[in-house]
Amino acid sequence: MRPLFLVLLLTAAPLPAFAADLLLFEARGCYWCDRWKDEVGDYYHLTREGHAAPLRVVSLDRPTPPDLTWVRGVRASPTFVLVDRGREIGRIVGYDGEQAFWRQMTGIMGRIPAPLRHRIAHPVP
């Protein structure tokens, strides 16, 4: 089922392009973090979402990077936080499988404010 899902995902309508990051807050030994990396992380960067919001991994086992001290309330791993220009657009707490992740990610990407929406000129192959 994964190849079909990936094909459908990669051929979907273009997403808005904006200066964003998808932050993955993870902790050492996190089973669900490793599962996400195995099921989604290997190809996330190839997706429209991955191009619009590149992944940045943040360890909960280390001090918060200075540029992210404004991100509050991350208490579980994995927690995915979509950020744009210093503000949070949305978050996904936990990982409940590949399809659930993409459903939630689609919802978060849809929250991008209208003034920031610019179409990606060329879809990702």
Image (cartoon, rainbow, N blue to C red):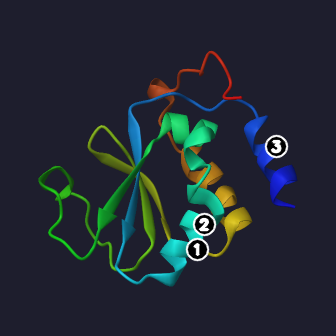
> Callout 3: 10 Å neighbours few (<14), some, many (20+)?
few
Mark 2 near mark 1, Cβ–Cβ under 8 Å?
A: yes
Distance from Cα at disc 2 to Cα at disc 1: 5 Å
Task: Give the residue pinned by disc 3.
Answer: 7
Residue drawn at 77 percent across, 36 percent down: 12
Find residue 44 and report its horizontal and vertical position in percent.
Answer: 58, 49
Residue drawn at 74 percent across, 31 percent down: 13
Return the residue nearer the eye: 64 or 44.
Answer: 44
Q: Name the element at disc 1.
A: helix
Q: Name the element at disc 2.
A: helix
Task: Give the residue pinned by disc 2.
Answer: 38
> Callout 1: 10 Å neighbours few (<14), some, many (20+)?
some
Distance from Cα at disc 2 to Cα at disc 3: 18 Å
Return the residue nearer the eye: 44 or 72.
Answer: 44
Is 78 drawn above or below residue 8 in the view shown? below
Q: Amino acid at mark 1?
A: Arg
Find residue 59 and report its horizontal and vertical position in percent.
Answer: 29, 68
Find residue 68 and report its horizontal and vertical position in percent.
Answer: 21, 55
Distance from Cα at disc 3 to Cα at disc 1: 21 Å
Res 94 visible: no
- For discs 2 and 3, the disc positioned in front in the rendered view: 2
Q: Amino acid at mark 3?
A: Val
| Quarter occupied by the N terminus | bottom right
Task: Give the residue pinned by disc 1.
Answer: 35
